[in-house]
C-alpha cells in the first residue's frame, strides 16, 4: 500500500497589500513531498522560494495574506490550525533553518541555553537529561569539545560553527520535516560542503523529509532527489535531480547557462532574457 505524502500543497497563494493593490509573490503553487524525500526549490532571488517555505509553517503575517486549497502535513490540515496548534507544530514536527542562521541566535544567551530552550518548549525533561541531549546534539553536528562550546556565546563562534549550532537547535526536537532556506549562503565553499553533508547525514539518519531552498542549481542537484524550479512565484518545471541538466523549460535552461564554469571559454556569460521572462 502506497503511503500518503508527508506534505501536500495545492494552489498556495501569498500576497501583500501595497498602495496600488495586492501583489502576489506565490501564485498557485502546488507540490508534494514524500516521506524521507529530499526536495530542492531553486530560482532567482524574488522567485518566491523563501515565501513558500515560510508559508508551510504559516509564518506569513499581516499585511501578508496566505491561502491554499490544500496545505496538509502528515494528514493534518495546516490551514485549519490555530496559532496555539501551529506553535506546537513549529520546531517539534517541522523545523526551518533561516538564511544566515548564525544571526538568528540570541546574543546574550549561551549556545547550550538556546539549544536547550528549543527542546524545552516541546518536551518536559529533567535538567540532567536536557543537558545530556544538548551535548549529544552538539556532538552529532561534529562540534569538538561540546561541553565548552555549550558555555560560549554566539559572538565567540565562527560562521561555520554558528551554522552547526543552528542545525543542532532545529533538529534537537527530532522533527519530521526540515526546511533549509539557503543554510550555507554566508559560508565559504569548503565549509558549505561540510554543513550540507552534515544536514544530509542527519536527515537520512533520522528518516526526515527535507526541503532545501537555494539559488545554487549544482548544490541542489547533488543533495536532493527532486527539484522544483520557481520563477515569478510560480513553478515552471519539476524534474528528478539527476535530470536537472536535461531540463527543457527555457527559464531552467537560462539558469543553467548563466552558471560560470571552472574551465570557462565563453567570452560573455549568458543572462536571462527579461523581455520574454526566460531563456538566454
Image: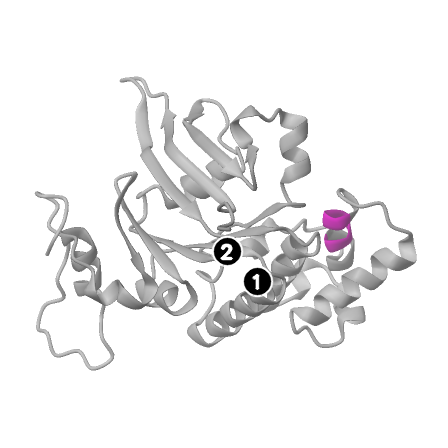
**Whole-percent x, y for residue 156 in the image:** 68, 65
Q: Which residue is most to the bottom?
A: 263
According to the picture, the residue beneath numbered tag 1 turns out to be 203
> Was residue 118 drawn as part of the magenta stretch in this picture?
yes
Relative placement, left or right, of 230 versus 156 is left
The image shows residue 94 at horizontal and vertical percentages of 59, 45
Cβ–Cβ under 8 Å for marks 2 and 1: yes
Q: Which mark is first along the chain, 1 or 2?
A: 1
Q: How many marks?
A: 2
Residue 48 locus on image (x, y percent): 35, 41
Which of the pair 153/5 is nearer the observer?
5
- Give the class, few, some or many, for how many residues have Cα within 10 Å of label 1's Cα (few <14, many ≥20): many
- In the rendered image, the vertical position of residue 191 relative to residue 22, given as above or below: below
Q: Is residue 19 above or below residue 256?
A: above
> Helix, strand or loop at disc 1?
helix
Coloration of the structure image = one colour
Q: Helix, strand, or loop for circle 2?
A: strand
Residue identified by numbered label 2: 210
Residue 168 within the magenta-colored segment of the rendering = no
Left or right of 62 on screen, residue 268 = left
Q: Position of residue 80 (x, y in %)?
A: 56, 24
Q: Residue at x 16, y 53 (%)?
A: 249
Q: Foreground residue, 50 or 252?
A: 252
Tell me where the magenta segment starts and ends, as one range.
115-119
Q: Quadrant of residue 65?
A: top left
Q: Residue at x 34, y 62 (%)?
A: 216
Is residue 273 visible in the rendered structure shown here?
yes
Q: Main secondary structure of the magenta part?
A: helix
Q: Which residue: 36% across, 26% down?
A: 15
Q: Classify 10 Å Cα crowding around label 2: few (below 14), some (14-19), many (20 and above).
A: many
Amino acid at each position: 500500500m502506497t503511503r500518503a505524502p508527508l506534505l501536500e500543497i495545492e494552489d498556495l497563494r501569498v500576497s501583500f497589500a501595497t498602495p496600488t493593490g495586492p501583489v502576489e509573490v506565490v501564485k498557485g503553487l502546488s507540490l508534494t513531498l514524500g516521506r524521507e524525500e529530499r526536495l530542492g526549490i531553486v530560482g532567482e532571488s524574488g522567485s518566491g522560494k523563501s515565501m513558500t517555505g515560510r508559508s508551510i509553517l504559516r509564518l506569513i503575517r499581516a499585511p501578508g495574506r496566505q491561502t491554499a486549497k490544500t496545505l496538509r502535513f502528515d494528514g493534518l490540515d495546516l490551514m485549519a490550525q490555530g496559532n496555539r496548534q501551529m506553535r506546537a507544530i513549529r520546531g517539534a514536527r517541522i523545523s526551518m533553518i533561516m538564511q544566515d542562521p548564525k544571526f538568528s541566535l540570541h546574543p546574550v544567551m549561551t549556545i547550550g541555553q538556546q539549544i536547550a530552550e528549543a527542546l524545552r518548549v516541546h518536551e518536559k525533561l529533567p535538567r540532567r537529561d536536557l543537558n545530556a541531549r544538548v551535548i549529544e546534539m552538539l556532538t552529532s553536528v561534529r562540534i569538538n569539545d561540546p561541553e565548552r562550546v555549550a558555555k560560549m556565546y554566539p559572538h565567540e563562534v565562527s560562521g561555520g560553527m554558528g551554522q552547526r549550532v543552528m542545525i543542532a537547535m532545529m533538529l534537537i526536537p527530532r522533527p519530521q520535516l526540515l526546511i533549509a532556506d539557503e543554510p550555507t549562503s554566508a559560508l565559504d565553499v569548503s565549509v558549505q560542503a561540510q554543513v550540507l553533508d552534515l544536514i544530509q547525514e542527519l536527515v537520512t539518519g533520522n528518516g526526515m523529509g527535507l526541503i532545501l531552498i537555494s539559488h545554487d542549481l549544482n548544490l541542489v542537484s547533488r543533495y536532493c532527489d527532486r527539484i522544483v524550479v520557481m520563477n515569478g512565484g510560480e513553478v515552471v518545471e519539476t524534474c528528478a535531480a539527476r535530470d536537472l541538466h536535461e531540463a527543457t523549460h527555457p527559464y531552467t535552461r537560462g539558469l543553467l547557462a548563466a552558471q560560470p564554469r571552472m574551465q570557462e571559454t565563453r567570452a560573455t556569460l549568458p543572462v536571462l532574457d527579461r523581455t520574454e521572462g526566460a531563456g538566454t
